[in-house]
Image (spheres, rainbow, N blue to C red):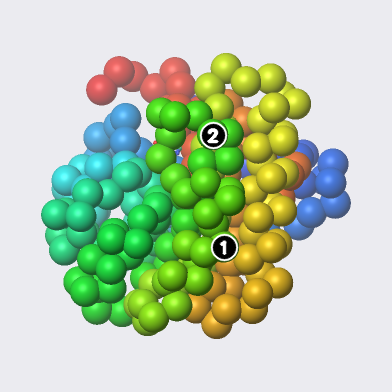
Amino acid sequence: MIADNLLKIQQDIQDSCALVHRNPKEVTLVAVTKSVDSATTEKLIECGIKNCAENRVDKLLQKKQDLLKYPDVKWHLIGNLQRRKVKLIVNEIDCFHALDSLKLAEEIQKRVEKPLACFIEVNVSGEESKHGISPEELLSFVESLAALSKIKVVGLMTMAPKDASVKQIRKVFRTLKELRDLVQTKEFTYAPCTELSMGMSQDFQLAVEEGATFIRVGTALFKDEEEQ
Ligand SMILES: *Cc1c(COP(=O)(O)O)cnc(C)c1O
């Protein structure tokens, strides 16, 4: 089942890329494994998945430990990170997708050994329930990271609003891309900001059409798999 789901998703990525003349190699599929156990995650890896994501520190650490025999897998933390948990996780991950405050960045700077690839989470839709920096504050936030040598801003991340129309979702993704391009024009060495982490099971095709380079897909990979 997982293998079939994965093939279908890969085909959808290719189709979306073809529509807008993009190379599918530009799109990294990050498998969000938060709803499944380590054994199911292992099946995914055996199918060729090389990037796994969790939104909770404890679950990520557990899975990474269970799957030590796959040292090439990259681990992404995609959820909101509490400052007191920073020291537990920052040296265990390859990429953090939800940087949203200077205090958090300072804590990462203090605890991480090597520079960490970070996405700044942007609350494009303005929903109060969402984390993230507002679009208006983004540039000054990026500037405030200049002195933090271990924070590498690789790109921007967002979540589309729930129950939104295709048009609204596209607008959110398009705005994130414009914001990314804006940061790029500043040519900050610590913020190359070339990547866009956007698109989940429901909307990754739209995200790819709008320029996503990392899509975070969970449920679509596991549908029809036995209940855990
Ligand atoms: C759960 C989650 C996803 C994946 O969502 P699906 O709808 O299961 O594909 C992506 N990004 C974040 C931040 C998540 O928490």
| Residue displayed at 21% across by 43% down | 59
| Residue displayed at 50% across by 78% down | 190
Residue type, label 2: Gly
| Residue displayed at 55% across by 82% down | 189
Q: Classify 24 as above or below 161.
A: below
Query: Residue 107: x percent and y percent?
Result: 23, 66
Local secondary structure at mark 2: loop
Query: Residue 20: x percent and y percent?
Result: 84, 46
Quarter in which the C terminus is drawn: top left
The circle on residue 139 is: 1
Q: Classify 80 as above or below 72.
A: above
Disc 2 to disc 1: CB gap under 8 Å: no
Q: Is residue 103 left or right of residue 25?
A: left
Residue type, label 1: Leu
Query: Residue 7: x percent and y percent?
Result: 60, 37
Quarter of the image where ligand 1 sits: top left
Cα separation, mark 2 vs mark 1, equals 17 Å
Q: Categorize mark 1 by other alpha carbons within 10 Å: few (<14), some (14-19), many (20+).
A: some
Mark earlier in primary sequence (2, 1): 2
Query: Residue 72: x percent and y percent?
Result: 37, 65
- The residue that label 2 is drawn on is 126
Q: Is residue 124 visible?
A: yes
Local secondary structure at mark 1: helix
